[in-house]
Image (tube, grey):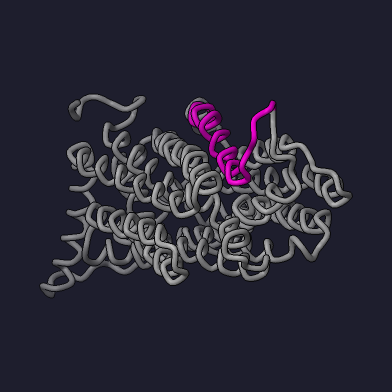
């Protein structure tokens, strides 16, 4: 293992980040897969109360990265921010393993704070492994995203089984163990990350030295910089709507699976929390295909805004598919789990057009000295979307499922059409970045 070897044709440091993020996502999605079920079944929360608590938590997880990006850019640096964030996340999961209700809120708070430090900065380190203009960047983020989803696939299966089949709090502890594995992987693989860390630290030190020594002040952001940041903000709005539909897997569709789906397939008893893993399983299968496709198309591939528009159309079609399933369910029929499997497959076609592409795009559009901060701003789209997903779960017992799924489909498909109409002005803002 040396710096000359590569990871599927990419810098060796990508393997370290791949497995670190895999274990971190194991812990996050493992616990998230049964969180709203724990609130409604074990704690006796109403749908409205559980939806509010769930939405506030998952949106906060994506809100704090903007602070974590600033802390890394200003003080800690990306490597230490990821390390400290991972430690706090692990402590949060282990706190959730205690039964009294105050430990629930304390544990969720720690996870929120730790994720704020870890999430934007590990993606920034991925971007630092590549030189400007390296065509492998999008493909590298797709591979990295496959690692995310490998953890997201295994977490709900293992932690969800322990939580729903044995004890809820054992599931929380299992998630904490996963984060510890991620930290071990991260520390042991640091030498593979060193070239990227050195580049990021050199940029940060030069910036801080200029500010504190009274030397040559940094040049202000150029009009082109502001236009590119503006493009990130526009895409942020559309990404928020996408995540508002997609992230209902952990809220509305999780409750739908628990209450309306026949939880048995081929003689195997299923747990509602397991359905969260279906999304990740499809990403694992499809990520290599999409990574190959973007490299194969090269300059002929759709622009990043066009990929965002396609993502919105796909997630909207997935909810169109669920409309007849919702109608059957509310007529008193337990529907086949294959309805959710098919819907999640379509959703994943959209996610792979948006999420890894969005991460890569931010590292290309953001000014170098603010890359982690702008990455944190982009993650606000996940915060807004996750809050919408929690908010929608409040209506599952008061609004017909056909209406609930239909409105989600109409909003996302409409947004996709609008984004297609805005492709030219957005590309102008991006200033030649695809």
Residue under the point 37% across and 64% down: 110
Magenta-drawn stretch, dominant element (helix, strand or loop): helix
Residue beneath the point at 17% across and 38% down = 191
- Residue 235 colored in magenta in the image: no
Image x and y of residue 416, in percent: 69, 51
Q: Is residue 331 left or right of residue 334?
A: right
Residue 308 visible = yes
Residue 371 appears in the rendering:
no
Say above or below: 247 vs 46: above
Quadrant of the snapshot with the N terminus: top left
Work out whether residue 431 or residue 167 is closer to the camera in this orientation and state it: 167
**Residue 390, located in which quarter of the rendered image?**
bottom right
Q: Position of residue 395 (x, y in %)?
A: 74, 64
x and y percent of residue 223 in the render?
42, 65
* Left or right of 195 in this view: 290: right
Residue 240 pos. (x, y %)? 59, 59
| Name of the residue lying farthest toward the right | 331
State whether residue 310 is above or below residue 90.
above
> Does the stretch in magenta take in 293?
yes
- Compared with 78, 56 (above or below) is below
The reply, left or right, for residue 266 in relation to residue 353 is right
Residue extending farthest front: 166
Residue at 46% from the left image edge and 47% from the top image edge: 433
- Position of 207 compared to 421: left or right? left
Q: Quadrant of residue 263?
A: top right
Total residue callouts: 0
Q: Which residues are magenta?
A: 266-294
Q: Which residue: 67% across, 65% down? A: 47
* Frontmost residue, 71 versus 429: 71
């Amino acid at each position: 293992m040396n710096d000359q070897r590569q990871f599927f044709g990419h810098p060796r440091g990508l393997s370290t980040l791949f497995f670190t993020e895999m274990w971190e996502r194991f812990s996050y999605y493992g616990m998230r897969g049964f969180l709203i079920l724990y609130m409604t079944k074990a704690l006796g929360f109403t749908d409205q109360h559980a939806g509010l608590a769930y939405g506030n938590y998952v949106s906060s997880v994506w809100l704090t990265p903007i602070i974590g990006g600033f802390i890394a850019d200003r003080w800690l640096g990306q490597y230490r921010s990821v390390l400290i964030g991972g430690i706090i996340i692990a402590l949060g999961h282990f706190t959730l393993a205690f039964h009294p209700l105050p430990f629930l809120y304390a544990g969720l708070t720690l996870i929120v704070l730790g994720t704020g430090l870890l999430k934007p900065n590990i993606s920034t380190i991925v971007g630092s492994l590549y030189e400007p203009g390296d065509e492998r960047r999008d493909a590298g983020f797709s591979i990295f995203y496959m690692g995310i989803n490998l953890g997201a696939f295994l977490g709900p299966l293992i932690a969800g089984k322990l939580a729903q089949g044995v004890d809820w709090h054992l599931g929380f502890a299992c998630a904490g163990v996963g984060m510890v594995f991620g930290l071990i992987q991260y520390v042991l693989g640091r030498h593979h990350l060193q070239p990227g860390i050195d580049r990021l630290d050199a940029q940060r030190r030069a910036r801080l030295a200029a500010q504190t020594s009274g030397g040559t002040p940094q040049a202000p952001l150029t009009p082109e910089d502001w236009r590119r940041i503006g493009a990130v903000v526009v895409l942020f709005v559309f990404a928020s709507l996408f995540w508002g539909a997609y992230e209902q897997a952990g809220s509305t569709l999780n409750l739908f699976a628990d209450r309306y789906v026949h939880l048995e397939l081929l003689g195997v008893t299923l747990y509602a929390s397991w359905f969260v893993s279906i999304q990740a399983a499809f990403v694992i299968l499809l990520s290599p295909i999409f990574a190959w496709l973007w490299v194969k198309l090269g300059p002929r591939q759709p622009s990043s805004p066009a990929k965002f528009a396609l993502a919105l159309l796909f997630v909207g079609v997935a909810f169109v598919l669920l409309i007849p399933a919702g109608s059957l369910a509310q007529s008193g029929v337990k529907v086949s789990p294959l309805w959710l499997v098919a819907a999640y497959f379509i959703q994943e076609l959209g996610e792979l057009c948006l999420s890894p592409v969005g991460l890569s795009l931010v590292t290309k559009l953001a000014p170098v000295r603010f890359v982690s901060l702008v990455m944190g701003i982009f993650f606000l789209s996940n915060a807004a979307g996750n809050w919408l997903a929690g908010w929608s779960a409040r209506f599952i017992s008061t609004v017909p499922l056909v209406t609930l799924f239909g409105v989600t489909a109409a909003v996302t498909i409409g947004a996709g059409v609008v984004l297609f109409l805005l492709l030219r002005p957005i590309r102008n803002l991006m200033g030649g970045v695809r």
